[in-house]
Amino acid sequence: MENNKSIISFRNADIRGGESTVIYGLDMDVYSGDFMYIVGKVGTGKTSIIKTMIAENPLQKGEGHVCGFDLRHIREKDIPFLRRRLGVVFQDFQLLMDRSVEENLEFVLRATGWKSGSDISRRISEVLEAVGMAHKSHRMPHQLSGGEQQRIAIARALLNKPEVILADEPTGNLDSETAEGIMELLTGINRGRGTAIVMVTHNRTIFDRYPGRVFECRDETCKEITEEQP
């Protein structure tokens, strides 16, 4: 891993959640091709790390770099450009309920600078095919199951060919069989495309079944668990 490219890097970083610091002295590197979990109990700062990575939570102490952007000194106007380099998948899908699947994806592409209608249509077809949802492009979100909505959310995250996908409890609202399908999809994207995945979860069975690097949040710290540790 030493020769691999670091996409996300924190050094002695304090992570805030709301008005208070929830994690002190975070050291973390995410490399190209990583599949990495951030685990821990509710309220230990897992989601706050993701929010810091996308510059929703400001980094006030330590160093943080994401996709070439310095989180300590990022300007407000540059935050959208940072977020275009990332794909983000949420537990509650966050689809626009008044638009079809295709219109949801078109909205994101146009918002991130795509102009050509033919290029937009081609890219939408590519990402829907990648997540096994090409036949659902004209459906409204409420016509889809939870697992299907999450597949669309993953397609949305792939639109701008991100270096890394940040997935915050992507299986949290799904039954175990549907969650397994989502994990197969994410691990397939990781292996097939080399896209790094950073996934927040509290479900131990997931990271036992789909191995990856594991960072554990506890006692106001977040540290990588090595194989020697219990």
Image (tube, rainbow, N blue to C red):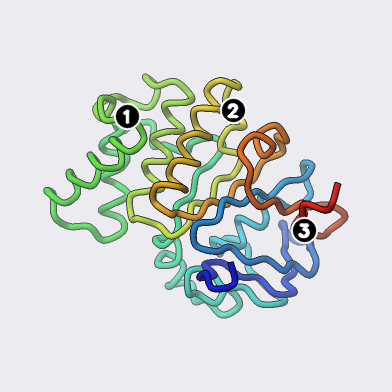
Q: Which residue is mark 1?
A: 133
Q: Nearer the viewer, mark 3 or mark 2?
A: 3
Which type of secondary structure does the marked residue at label 2 adopt? loop
User: Of helix, strand and loop, which one carries label 3?
Assistant: strand
In the rendered structure, the answer to whether residue 195 lies left or right of residue 223 reads left
**Does 77 sit left or right of 170 as displayed?**
left
Q: Earlier in the sequence, mark 1 or mark 3?
A: 1
Image coords of residue 222 (percent x, y)? 77, 58
Picture layout, residue 134 above or below residue 207 = above
| 20 shown above or below 95 | below
Residue 55 at x, y = what percent? 56, 64
Q: Position of residue 179 (x, y in %)?
A: 56, 27
Determine the CA span between mark 1 and mark 3.
36 Å
Q: Residue at x 66, y 58 (%)?
A: 49
Disc 3: CA contacts within 10 A as few (<14), some (14-19) or many (>=20): many
In the depicted view, which residue is nearer to us: 76 or 183?
Answer: 183
Q: What residue sits 72% from the left and 71% below the top?
A: 13
Secondary structure of the residue carrying numbered label 1: loop
Q: Say which residue label 3 marks.
A: 222
Q: Quadrant location of residue 62?
A: bottom right
Residue type marked 2: Asn
Left or right, 222 with reference to 116: right
Which amino acid is tagged 1? Answer: Met
Pointer 2: what residue?
A: 173
At horizontal 57% and vertical 60% (from top left) the residue drawn is 56
Q: Amino acid at mark 3?
A: Cys
Task: Determine crowd level at label 1: few under 14, some 14-19, many 20+ residues with C-alpha closer than 10 A.
Answer: some
Of 182 and 220, the residue lying toward us: 182
The earlier-in-sequence mark between 3 and 2 is: 2
- Give whichever of discs 2 and 1 has the lower sequence position: 1
In the image, 84: left or right of 29? left
